[in-house]
Image (tube, grey):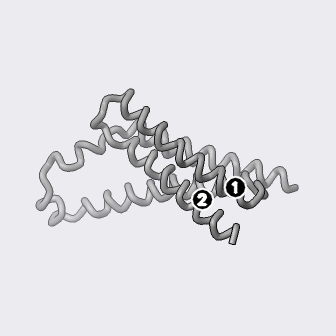
Amino acid sequence: MRKVFSVLLKILAGFFFYAVCLLGFVNEPQTGIKLGIMVGLLVPALAALAAGLALTRFDNWRRDTGIVLLCASGFTLFLIFSMACYLMAEEVRAMMSPDTLAVFSDYLTGGGAMVGFAVLGGFFMKTNKMASQ
């Protein structure tokens, strides 16, 4: 039963990490406010991840943390790719107003968060592999 709750908490943490990545692409609030919201979303992400890791007594914590971070950044990348493919259709672009996606134009912050989580997740996976040898 602990493993089930651990997995559910890690999924919840992954969702919050994904929300941080996705919020990075939004350019609406001022930069300081947006970064504050992103850090605010990191708090429940880290809390859920820590609780999920604690339920498994921190066994393979590097692997599990790496998987959560890689999945969050991978899902964000999948969403961006899906939207790009969706917008390739002429019919879809005709139905949308030209400024519909203008709110999702902060590529530096969003891409930085996504790449940062992916690099950190890959680092945890690599160090887990090195520690187990």
Extreme residue in the top direction: 32
Classify mark 1: residues with Cα within 10 Å, few (<14), some (14-19) or many (20+).
many
Which image quarter: residue 86? bottom left
Label 2: few (<14), some (14–19) or many (≥20) C-alpha neighbours in 10 Å = many
**Residue at mark 2:** 10
Task: Name the residue rendered at 25%, 43% in the picture.
Answer: 103
Q: How far apart are marks 2 and 1 (CA)?
A: 8 Å
- The residue lying toward the viewer, choosing from 85 and 122, is 122
Q: What residue type is labelled 2?
A: Lys
Q: Position of residue 50 (x, y in %)?
A: 65, 50
Judged from the image, the secondary structure of the residue bearing numbered disc 2 is helix
Quadrant of the rendered image containing residue 52: bottom right
Q: Locate residue 6, reporting x and y percent.
A: 65, 63
Quadrant where the N terminus is found in the figure? bottom right
* Residue at x 70% of width, y 48% of height: 124
Extreme residue in the front direction = 1
> In the image as oriented, which residue stretches furthest toward the right?
133
First along the sequence among labels 2 and 1: 2
Residue at image coords 36%, 30%: 33
Percent coordinates x, y for residue 116 in the rendering? 55, 41
Q: In this view, does 111 lie above or below 58?
A: above
Residues under numbered marks 2 and 1 in contact, where contact means CB atoms less than 8 Å apart: yes
Left or right of 3, for residue 46: left
Residue bearing the label numbered 1: 53
Residue 103 left/right relative to 60: left
